[in-house]
Amino acid sequence: METTLKTLAEFGITAVTITGLIAYLGRKIFEHYLSLKIDSYKNDLVRANYEHQTKFSKLHNDRAEFIKDLFSDFTELEKLINSVTTTWQGPEWLESHEREDKAKELLEQTKAKFEKNKIYFTKQLCDEIENALKVSKSFILESLRVKRQSNFEKEDRAFYLEKEKQGETAFRRWLKLEEESQEELLKIRESLADKFRSLFGVK
C-alpha cells in the first residue's frame, strides 16, 4: 500500500513538473513570438517613418524651389511694368507695345505657374498672390489705355482741350500711373517677401 501511494505521489509530482515545464515552455515560446512580432512592427514603423520623412523632405524642397521661382518672377515682373509705366521713354512710346507685350507674357507665365502649385499655400496667401497678379495686369492695361488716349489727343485738338480742362490728359494719367505702379508694386513685393519668409521661419 505504501509503495502504491509512494508511486502515485511520485507520478503526481512528475505530472505537475511536466505540466509546469510545458506551461513554462509555452509561455517562453509565446513571449519569443511576441518579441519577434514587436520587432517586426518596430522595423515597419521605422521604415514607414523614413519613407514619410523622405517624401516630406522632397515636398519641402519642391515647395521652397517653387517659392523662390515665384518671387523671382514677381521681381522681374515689377521691373518690366516699371519699364512700361516710366515717363523716361522716347518718341517710340506711342507706337511700340514691345514693353507691354513682354510684361504680359511674363504675367501669364507667372499666373499659369501659380495655378499649378496653389496647393503649397493657404487660401489667404493664394488670395494675396492672385490680387498681386490682378494689380500687375491693371497697370499694363492702363498703360495701353493712356497710349490710346494720347493718340486721340494728337488727332483731335478739341478732345485734348476737353481732357486738359478735366485735368485728365494722357500725360497726367501717365505721370499718375508711373507713381502708383512703382508704389504699389513695391508694397506687393515686400508683402510677399514677408509672407514667404514666414513659411521658412525666417524673420
Image (spheres, grey):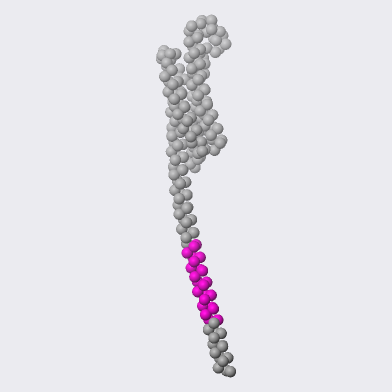
The answer to whether any part of residue 74 appears in the image is no
Residue 50 image position (x, y, % from top left): 45, 52
The answer to whether any part of residue 145 appears in the image is yes
State the quadrant of the N terminus: bottom right
Residue 175 image position (x, y, % from top left): 50, 17
Residue numbers of the magenta segment: 16-38
Marker count (numbered)? 0
Quadrant in the rendering for residue 76:
top left
Residue 124 image position (x, y, % from top left): 56, 35
Q: Is residue 180 above or below residue 27?
A: above
Nearer to the camera, 166 or 140:
140
In percent of the image, x 53 and y 75: which residue is there? 23
**The furthest residue to the bottom:** 1
Nearer to the camera, 3 or 183:
3
- Tell whether position 37 is magenta: yes
In percent of the image, x 50 and y 24: which residue is there? 137
Residue 100 image position (x, y, % from top left): 45, 20
Quadrant in the rendering for residue 89:
top left
In percent of the image, x 48 and y 56: which residue is there? 45
In percent of the image, x 51 and y 36: which residue is there? 118
User: What secondary structure prevails in the magenta region?
Assistant: helix
- Tell whether position 10 is magenta: no
